[in-house]
Image (cartoon, rainbow, N blue to C red):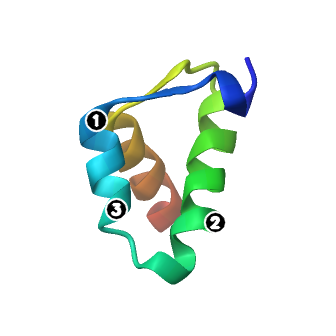
Amino acid sequence: MSQSELVWDDEALELLEKVPFFVRKAARKKIEKTAVESGESRITVELMEKIRSERAAS
């Protein structure tokens, strides 16, 4: 699975749009990279929240 093959849920894209524009591109890349490394094929709000909580814990 590559980042270009990932599917974004509409709700996840809406949440991404709430990220400040100056970090949105970096956030998207990080989310997609983490999803690929985890074997995910779909970006969901739940996955985004999981990634955010893991980053906060580290």
Q: Mark 1 falls on what kind of element?
A: helix
Q: Which residue is drawn at 63% across and 26% down?
A: 38
Q: Mark number for residue 50?
A: none
- 40 relative to 54, above or below: above
Residue placed most toward the observer, 53 or 19: 19
Q: Mark 2 points at which residue?
A: 26
Does the residue at mark 1 contact the one at mark 2 (Cβ under 8 Å)? no
Q: Mark 2 falls on what kind of element?
A: helix
Disc on the earlier residue, 3 or 2? 3
Q: Mark 3 points at which residue?
A: 17
Say which amino acid is labelled 1.
Asp
Binning the other alpha carbons within 10 Å of mark 2 as few (below 14), some (14 to 19) or many (20 upward) gives few
Q: Mark 1 points at which residue?
A: 10
Disc on the earlier residue, 1 or 3? 1
Quadrant in which residue 58 is drawn = bottom right
Q: Residue at x 40, y 79 (%)?
A: 20
Q: Mark 3 falls on what kind of element?
A: helix
Tell me the CA gap for discs 1 and 2: 19 Å
Tell me the CA gap for discs 1 and 3: 11 Å
Say which amino acid is labelled 3.
Glu
Q: Residue at x 52, y 61 (%)?
A: 55
- 31 relative to 18, above or below: above
Say which amino acid is labelled 2.
Ala
